[in-house]
Amino acid sequence: MRHVLSALVQNVPGVLANVSGMLSSRGYNIDSLAVGETENPDLSRMTFVLRGNDAVLEQVRKQLAKIVTVVRVDDISSQDFVERDLMLIKIKAESGAQRSEIRELADIFRGRIVDVGRGEVIVEISGQESKITPFIELVRPFGIIELVRTGRIAMVRSGPGPAEANDQ
Amino acid sequence: MTTSITKPPAAKPATETRIMLGADILVESLVRNGVEIIFAYPGGASMPLHQALTRYRDRLRTILPRHEQGGSFAAQGYARATGRPGVCMATSGPGATNLVTAIADAKLDSIPLIAITGQVKTQVIGTDAFQETPIVEVCRGITKHHYLVTDIKDLARVMKEAFHVATTGRPGPVLVDIPKDIQEARFVPDWDAPMHLPGYASTQPQAKPEQVRQVAAAIRLARRPVIYAGGGIISGEASEELRELAHKTGIPVAMTVMGLGAFPNDDPQSLDMLGMHGSVYANYAVNEADLVLALGVRFDDRVTGKLAEFAKHAKIVHVDVDASELNKNKLAHIPICSDVKPFLKELCRIVQPPEDIKDWVKQCAEWKRTEPYKYDRNFDGILAQHAIAELSRLTQERETIITVGVGQHQMWAAQFYRFKHPRTFESSSGLGTMGFGLPAALGAQAAYPDRLVVDIDGDGSFLMNIQELATAHCENLPIKVLLLNNQHLGMVVQWEDRFMDGNRAHTYLGPIHHAEATGQGSGAFATERYPDFVSIAKGFGCGAATISRKADLVPAITEMINYPGPYVLDVATPYLEHVLPMIPGGMTVKDIIKE
C-alpha cells in the first residue's frame, strides 16, 4: 500500500543524511522524498512516499520519530490531503507542428511552456502522480531530453468545506 | 584557575561570568554532569582538551588507555557497572574511528556513553586535512544522537543535551565532535542555557492505568505464565520491582544475556537464561507458556530462533521504553510503551496471583531438575565450564563483577557463573565484540576500586585488547583475568564442527604449520600454547600463572583473587568442547541440541 508520511524536522545540518541513512540502512524503499523549509525557519518539512504493509509503515514511522532531530511524523495517507509534484521536462520539438502539439498538450494538462529553444521546449507541470505520468507518456514519442521532478509534497485539507475546485 | 567554582544552590541559577576556553567549558560540563572518570587518549586535535583535563584533575580522574578502543570499552564498563554515563575521548581521524566499534556496541546494548572527539579546525573541515575524518557522518547510524560543534556559543548547551539524551528514554551513545579552534576559542558560557530538543520526549513514557489493569487481568487468568526479562530491567533499575512481581505471583523468570542479574539465579523461580544457549528449562517454559511477560527485551534472534514458532501458544505482553521495539520482530497482544520501573511498581500494587499455576510451577521445577546445565565433571583436565563454576563458587561471598569477551567462554560464563545482582555481568551482547572483556573490567574496577572484578576471557578475545594490561598496571586497576585458553576461536570451531564438517577455516590461533591449523590435531588439547601469556602479563607488570591440571585450579584461582594487583591466570582448556544446549540459528525449541 502507498503511504504518504509528513515529517517535521529541525532545520540543522545533517538531518537529511540522518533520515535517508536510517531509511536505507533498515532497507526501506522510498518512492519519493521532498524537503524544504517551513514557515518557521527552525523547522523543515520532509514528505516521503513509500510502499509497504501496515507493519512496515509502523516501523518506519517509529524509527523516524526516534531520530532526535525529527520533531513529529504523521502518516497522512488515511486523511484527506492535497498532493503535488512539480516537473520540468525538456522535450524535442524541431518543427512548428510539434511545438504547437506540445503546447496543446501542456494546456490540457494545465502546464506551461517556460522555455523555447531552437529544437526543444521546456514544460513546467505540477499535480498528482496520476496527472504527471500520463503527460510523460504522451510526450515520450516526441523525445524526452531531460526530466526533473521535485518529489511529492502533501498537505492535509482543512476539513469540511467545498471540495477543491480544480484537483487536476 | 577553576578550583574556586562551587555548585550553586539549585534555586539560584549560576551566574558565571568568567571568560573560559572552549576546552575548559567542555571539561567543566563533564564535572557539572557528575563525571568522575574519563578514559581519554590524546592527539593533535584533542590536545587543548587534555590540557584542560589537567586543570580539573582534582575533580576528574583521567585514565589513559593504550588504545582508543580500549578507552571506549572501559567507559562502557564503567557505565554498565554504575548505570551512570561512561565518558571517553579521542583525537580526530584514527583516534575517532577507533571509537566506532564501542559506539556501535553501546547502541545495540543501550549503554549511556558520551564519546568526545577532537576534530580539525573548522576552517579546514572538508579539505581532507591531516587526521580528518567526518566522524559524525561515520557514526550517524550507530549513535543515539551526535553533534559537530561549530560555534562555541552552543558548547555548554550541547554538552547538557548530550548527557540528557544519553541517559534518558532508551539509553545510548552520544558523540560530540569538537574542532580544535572551538576548543581554543574563548567565551563566557551560559550554564543555564535551555536545551533545544523539540523532537525528543521530555518525559519517560508511562503505561496507562488501564494497560496495567489489562496485564493484571491476563496474569490472573494465566495457567502457564513466564516472565522474559531483559536488559531493560537493569538499565531501568527495576530489578527490585521484578523480584517483587515474581514473588507476588509465583511466575517463573527467564532472562536474556543482558538481563542476567536482574533476578537472582539461586531463587527457585529462576529459569536462568533463555535463547540459543539458554537452559533447556527456560526454553521449554517459554515454548509451553500461555502468557509471556516480555519486560525490557527486544525479541532478538538469538533469543527467539524462528520467530513464528517462538512462544507460539502464548499471549504476549511486551513492555519497553522504546516504542519502535514494540511489534518490531514479534506482534504483541498487549504492547505497552513505558519505562519498566513505574509499570512494574503499579502492576505489583494491583496484581493478584494467577488462580492456579501450581502444576505449571511444578512442571518448570521438574524440567529444571532433570535438564540442568551440565558438563563432564570427571574430565581429566580443566573444562572451561568447570573453571567458571569454581570461580563462581569461590567468589560468591564477594561483590564480584564479571566481564567477558565473546564466544564460548562468554556463554559458559552466562550459564555457570551464579549472578545474584544487577550490574554484575558485563557482556557485549548485541554487537558481540571480541576484546570487550579486559577494557570493560578496567572501567568497572575504576568505578569500584574495592570490588573484585574478573574478566573471564578466551585467548582470541583477550589478545584483541591485550595492550590494556598496561593500563591496568599503570593506573593501579587490580583486575583479574581468568583466561580460558584453548588456542582456538572456540565458538567458530563449534559451528565448523556442527555445520561445516569440521573444516578448520582460520580458527586455530597458533603457528600455521601446526597440525591443529588444518584440523589434524590429536587429543583434546592443542599441543602447544601460543603466545606465552604469562610472559606477556609479567612484561606488562601484572602477576600471572599458568595451569593445566585440575588439582591446581582452586589454589590458582584463590591466589589470583587474593593478588593485590592485576593478574592473569592462563588455564589450558580443551578445544573440542561445545556450548550446550544449543538451538541452531533460525530454528525452534524442537531442534534443541543437548548432547
Image: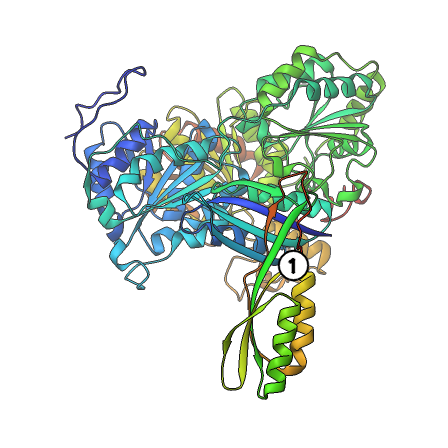
Relative depth, front residue between B515 and B47: B47
Mark yes or no: residue B484 visible.
no
Name the residue nearer the viewer: B138 or B473. Answer: B138
Is residue A28 something that shows in the picture? yes
Question: Is residue B137 positioned above or below B368 on the image?
Answer: below
Say what amino acid the circle numbered 1 marks: Gln
| Residue at 31% in and 15% down | B11
Residue B575: give x, y in percent of width and height. Answer: 61, 50
Q: Residue furthest left?
A: B1
Q: Quadrant of residue B349?
A: top right
Q: Dot 1 lies on which element?
A: loop
Q: Which residue is at 44% across, 37% downward?
A: B76
Question: If the image is split into quadrants, where does the N terminus of chain B sit?
Answer: top left
What residue is disc 1 on? A128
User: For residue B89, what is the image quadrant?
Assistant: top left
- Is residue B230 found left or right of A42 in the rendered image? right
Q: Chain of mark 1?
A: A
Mark 1 neighbour class, 10 Å CA radius: few under 14, some 14 to 19, many 20 or more = some
Task: Describe residue B430's horizontal placement relative to residue B62 as left or right.
Answer: right
Residue under the point 39% across and 36% down: B162
How far from the left and from the top, in percent, is residue B70? 40, 45
Q: What residue is drawn where x is 80% and y is 31%? A: B314
With B392 as the anchor, is B477 left or right in this view? left
Q: How many marks?
A: 1
User: Residue B415, located in which quarter of the rendered image?
Assistant: top right
x and y percent of residue B255 in the render?
65, 30
Name the residue nearer the viewer: B239 or A86: A86
Which quadrant would the C terminus of chain B be assigned to in this image?
A: top right
